[in-house]
Amino acid sequence: MGYSIKLFIILIILSSMLLASPAGSTTLFEKLISILVSGALIFSLIKGYLTVNKIWKRRKNEEVANSISIVAAMLGFAVGFPFLLNSLIITNDYFSAAKSVIALFLAFVFTMIGTGYYVDNNRGVGFLTLLGKALNLERKESGDLISDMIRPKGAKKIIDILVKLAAIDDDVAKEEIDLIKEFADKWNIDIPYLQPGKPEQVTNLVELKELVQSYLDEGPDVDVAEGLVDLINMMAEADDEVTEEEAIAVAEFTGMIAHYVSLELGGELEMFEVNIVPQGDEQVQAVKELLPDLEDVADRGGRVFKVGKYFSEDYAEAVCAKYISLGLYSGTNKVVVDMSKEKK
């Protein structure tokens, strides 16, 4: 590396000496600028070499060829030629002319690699055919960056949530499919084939709740998260019939999103706490076997197992019903959660 630096310095000095004007015709500052320009030209040569060298050994790789924008490479010609002609004919600026030549050389190399000319599978295929294929591929992919920029964070999970929500009542409506496709197309996201009627797999409410929580854990923008509430409600009402399962899901997920927004913005939130109140030692043992990670606490003058806090009363009541069906006394009570403390 030290040898290379010394070589660069020597080349800069030699260039400045060769290109220097007669003594007294230029100021010290002008000579300094001339040296810097000479150095910049040499560094441009080195930069061009290193750029090509890095990709040249991979020129036969089809993925590498497809990763090069053929339009951007060809635009190098449109930019380079006018500047080259201007530098040679009008301004007589040979430094700029040399830079234009370097740029044209890079445009040529990247155009050839970008068309897949060096790819083994393309041997025998004409250059114009390869150019046409490369341009067609670029046309198809031209909107990818814009789509990634305009679609919201976690868009794929939003679509997954909508797909699973559509199947929660064991019946997927055409209106629900149309709504899912509308947003999937808008965000350029591939979705599985959907058809009206009974789904292949009925959505588990607990799994769907975990998916919603996973989406919120990614930290979406607050306004996008709030927009998901509208989407979920639109899905539930798409077929003009809101089933009990959909109503419970919508209520709970709306609460989850409200909780997330409250965490981000601060404030308080009402939640519904589910408690199991065992009636005797036998039920205490039963709860410990059913929920081994749950510890009982002293509350209301007795031993209480606090199952968890939920965002909707309907969802909390559904959880209670599950434990009541097992012969355990369970109930809910409303609690106010301070989000500023929760976030800490």
Image (cartoon, rainbow, N blue to C red):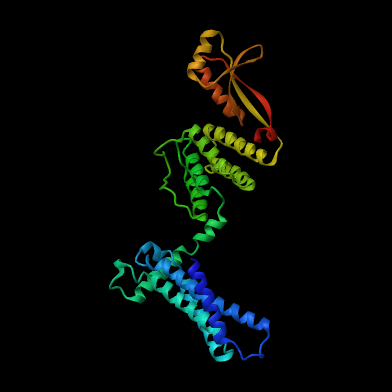
Q: Residue furthest right?
A: 267
Q: Is residue 104 above or below residue 312?
A: below
Residue 4 pos. (x, y %): 48, 70
Residue 219 pos. (x, y %): 59, 44
In this image, 60 relative to 323: left or right?
A: left
Between residue 305 and residue 89, name the one nearer to us: 89
Q: How many marks?
A: 0
Q: Residue furthest left?
A: 124
Between residue 187 and residue 148, name the one nearer to us: 148
Residue 217 pos. (x, y %): 56, 40
Q: Is residue 233 above or below residue 77?
A: above
Which quarter shows the C terminus? top right
Residue 8 pos. (x, y %): 52, 74
In this image, 260 relative to 55: left or right?
A: right
Q: Residue at x 71, y 36 (%)?
A: 267
Between residue 89 and residue 239, name the one nearer to us: 89
Give residue 114's quadrant in the image: bottom left
Q: Residue at x 55, y 91 (%)?
A: 89
Q: Is residue 35 above or below residue 214?
A: below
Give residue 276's quadrant in the image: top right
Q: Residue at x 66, y 14 (%)?
A: 300
Residue 130 shows up from this direction = yes
Residue 241 shows up from this direction = no
